[in-house]
Image: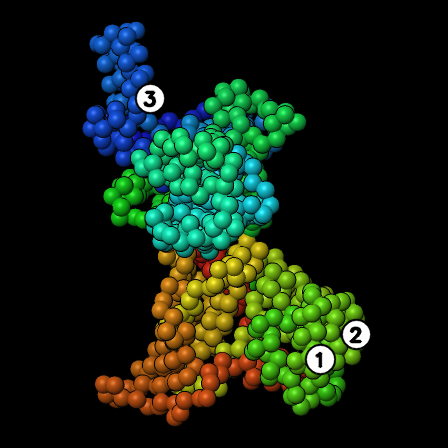
């Protein structure tokens, strides 16, 4: 097997062929899928190895003291041989990974071969294809948690142990100094605990990332903004806890901690930074300085780590292994989001080059993962199922007017983009609005003229006089509410997305088959935009494959937006990406057969490439880092010597063969406002409900678009094209 090693004397890094470790009793042999580079601890080791002998000595005074003791005991020659022999040996790197159990040792009964586990330990969770891991240093990975995310388990446990040492309480305010990998995780764990967080880091990119992940405010340590934020959040008293997650030789972190702490505040050292405590500052506030020892109780205890002797839970609630399992659970439930921390995924074979890029500063990263051959092989041809819809629709009801509508949800999109087109429309009656809070229902009733307002969904679904239900709630509830409305026999208009997982989509389609009710529309409105429809008509029929480019200048979301809650509500692209995939598929008159997705550092900007059966391709660039003044959506369709250009639903142009720059058509006038098709889409839906005719978009197309949207996340996780496999 292969393993990453370093010679501490020469600084050489290498991927060596080494023997496979044996599977000893009390542990498991694990084949690695992903391992995580600690950009703090490991890079410090790599940098130290490149120093001169004097530099090494200065950086490790603890080791120098051991050498001097050996000289006193064994003499200079023996000590020299011993030290040189140790330095001139290969040492391993790595301590956090996720992999598959290949073999189970005697005495292990909590996992079996084939199970996915997260592993810890700088002697057992190495950057190697296979590792033997003792029982107390692995934990089973919860169902549904991606292996690349589970690989964060060890560093997550380090952050968690630090937070536990701070003993945070609801409503407190904490300061996190250093927003590298550990600091970013500490921010999220504190936010999940009900603590408001101020972050400190000289890197503005890391500050912005921490704010997106839950910090109330972040800034440079020298900036007045940090002190102002602490003063505002604490009423001038100072923070309750400070977490030192910074490295380096500066004493600034401990001085800043003293200045911004409240009286008798707690200061927790997690990182390896200079700790020359300013005596007066710490004494006058009687600050409680605490240290966090790695992953938790059990660390450095050979009986716990190697012999598997657990501590009684009544005496030690949180051990290394319990911290590891707890962190994995938080990530699986979406309370901690590690995906935005992934700056780069490298093949294990490129480990040396990756370390060198990190050391030289060419690769700026918070977290870097190694992907191993087994994981890469599994990712070469992943597939997302596109379920086939088998339904015998119930007989269409006789046409009638008015069509009676109920709205489930009355948030910003419903009240600004849908209800204004329905209120007062001839042949439509707004019957009931359902919300989770009484006041929002009452507001919608007053503004748009609903006959009733309620918080009781069951009553609405049981009302046989209601013809159609609009589901306009948060994304995580769409699939279940759609299912319930279909079972109640209603026509359903659900805002995108229809589902956030393959299981949710399968559940909706099972309901369609069970009930015979396929009266479903998803709010993909752009295909109904008048300007785009006119442009497609003028483009005409294609004879060859097309290339489509769709730039979505999405912009940044405000801090605190529920759209940023990826664990609970799906990624931002999962929420609105279906719009752009549906538009591309409608223009190309087909459903995609494969999806390839890549992201920039931090997954802020996505490139999604769709391939269609006739060889056409569509590239969707979904970016959040562009200029706010640039148009949100621009689209180019190229085929058969023609180019169709759409500028943000305001202007369209058609360029044709016959000369450089020759135009066949330009939209004659600018519309009074951007029309992205909501009004026409609603008119088509109401007509279908009123007449019993076909729904505006075939159900097969809605399913294909939803599956393609889900495939984007699968593609990002696997790093390979995802086949959209039709199932029967």
Q: Which residue does the image show at 41% across and 70% down from the upper left?
A: 552
Q: Position of residue 435 (x, y in %)?
A: 69, 68
Q: Which residue does the image show at 55% across and 32% down from the upper left?
A: 321
- Split into 4 quadrants, where in the image is the C terminus? bottom right
Q: Give whichever of discs 3 and 1 has the lower sequence position.
A: 3
Residue that badge 2 annotates:
463
Q: Is residue 627 left or right of residue 595?
A: left
State the residue in front, 487 or 304. Answer: 304
- What color scheme is it? rainbow
Q: Is residue 478 left or right of residue 3?
A: right
Between the residue at mark 3 and the residue at mark 2, the CA separation in whole angstroms equals 76 Å
The relative height of residue 376 versus residue 652 in the rendered view (above or below) is above
Q: Secondary structure at mark 1?
A: loop
Visible residue check, residue 345: no
Residue that badge 3 annotates:
62
Q: Position of residue 365 (x, y in %)?
A: 35, 47
């Amino acid at each position: 097997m292969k393993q990453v090693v370093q010679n501490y004397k020469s600084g050489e890094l290498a991927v060596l062929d080494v023997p496979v470790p044996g599977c000893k009793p009390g542990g498991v042999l694990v084949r690695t899928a992903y391992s995580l580079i600690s950009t703090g601890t490991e890079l410090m080791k790599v940098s130290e190895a490149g120093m001169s002998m004097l530099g090494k000595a200065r950086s490790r005074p603890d080791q120098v003291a051991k050498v001097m003791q050996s000289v006193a005991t064994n003499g200079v020659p023996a000590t020299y041989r011993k030290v040189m022999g140790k330095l001139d040996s290969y040492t391993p790197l790595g301590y956090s990974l996720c992999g598959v159990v290949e073999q189970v040792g005697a005495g292990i009964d909590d996992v079996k071969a084939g199970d996915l586990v997260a592993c810890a330990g700088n002697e057992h969770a190495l950057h190697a294809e296979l590792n033997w891991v003792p029982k107390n240093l692995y934990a089973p990975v919860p169902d549904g948690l991606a292996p690349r995310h589970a690989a964060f388990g060890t560093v997550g446990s380090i952050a968690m142990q630090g937070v536990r040492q701070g003993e945070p309480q609801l409503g407190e305010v904490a300061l996190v100094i250093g927003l590298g990998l550990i600091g970013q995780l500490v921010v999220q764990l504190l936010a999940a605990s009900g603590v408001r967080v101020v972050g400190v880091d000289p890197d503005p990119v890391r500050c912005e990332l921490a704010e997106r992940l839950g910090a109330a405010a972040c800034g440079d340590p020298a900036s007045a903004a940090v002190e102002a934020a602490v003063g505002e959040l604490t009423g001038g008293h100072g923070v309750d806890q400070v977490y030192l997650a910074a490295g380096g030789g500066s004493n600034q972190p401990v001085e800043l901690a003293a200045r911004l702490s409240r009286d008798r505040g707690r200061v927790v050292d997690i990182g390896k930074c200079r700790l020359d405590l300013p005596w007066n500052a710490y004494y006058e506030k009687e600050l409680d300085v605490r240290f966090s020892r790695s992953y938790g109780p059990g660390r450095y205890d050979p009986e716990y780590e190697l012999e598997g002797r657990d501590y009684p839970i009544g005496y030690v609630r949180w051990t290394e292994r319990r911290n590891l399992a707890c962190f994995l659970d938080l990530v699986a439930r979406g309370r901690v989001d590690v995906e935005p921390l992934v700056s780069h995924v490298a093949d294990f074979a490129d480990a040396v080059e990756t370390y060198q890029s990190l050391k030289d500063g060419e690769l700026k990263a918070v977290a870097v993962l190694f992907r191993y051959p087994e994981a890469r092989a599994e990712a070469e041809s992943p597939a997302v199922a596109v379920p086939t819809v088998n339904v015998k629709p119930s007989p269409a009801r006789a046409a009638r007017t008015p069509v009676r509508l109920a709205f489930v949800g009355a948030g910003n999109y419903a009240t600004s983009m849908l209800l204004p087109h329905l209120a007062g429309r001839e042949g439509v009656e707004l019957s009931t609005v359902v919300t989770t809070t009484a006041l929002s229902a009452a507001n919608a009733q007053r503004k748009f003229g609903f006959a009733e307002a309620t918080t009781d969904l069951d009553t609405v679904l049981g009302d046989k006089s209601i013809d159609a239900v609009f589901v306009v709630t948060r994304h995580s509830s769409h699939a279940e509410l759609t299912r319930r409305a279909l079972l109640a026999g209603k026509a359903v208009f659900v805002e995108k997305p229809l589902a956030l997982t393959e299981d949710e989509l399968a559940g909706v389609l099972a309901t369609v088959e069970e009930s015979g009710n396929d009266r479903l529309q998803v709010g993909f409105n752009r295909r109904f935009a008048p300007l785009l429809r006119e442009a497609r008509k003028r483009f005409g029929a294609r004879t060859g494959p097309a290339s489509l480019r769709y730039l979505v200048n999405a912009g940044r979301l405000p801090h605190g937006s529920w759209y940023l809650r990826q664990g609970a509500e799906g990624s931002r692209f999962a929420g609105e990406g279906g719009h752009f995939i549906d538009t591309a598929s409608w223009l190309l008159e087909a459903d995609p057969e494969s999806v390839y997705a890549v992201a920039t550092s931090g997954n802020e900007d996505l490139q999604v490439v769709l391939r269609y059966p006739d060889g056409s391709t569509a590239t969707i660039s979904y970016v959040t880092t562009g200029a706010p003044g640039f148009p949100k959506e621009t689209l180019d369709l190229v085929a058969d010597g023609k180019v169709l250009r759409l500028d943000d639903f305001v202007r369209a142009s058609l360029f044709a063969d016959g000369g450089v720059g020759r135009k066949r058509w330009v939209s004659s006038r600018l519309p009074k406002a951007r029309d992205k098709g909501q009004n026409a889409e609603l008119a088509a839906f109401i007509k279908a409900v009123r007449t019993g005719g076909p729904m505006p978009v075939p159900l097969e197309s809605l399913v294909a678009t939803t599956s393609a949207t889900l495939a984007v996340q699968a593609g990002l996780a696997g790093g390979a094209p995802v086949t959209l496999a039709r199932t029967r």
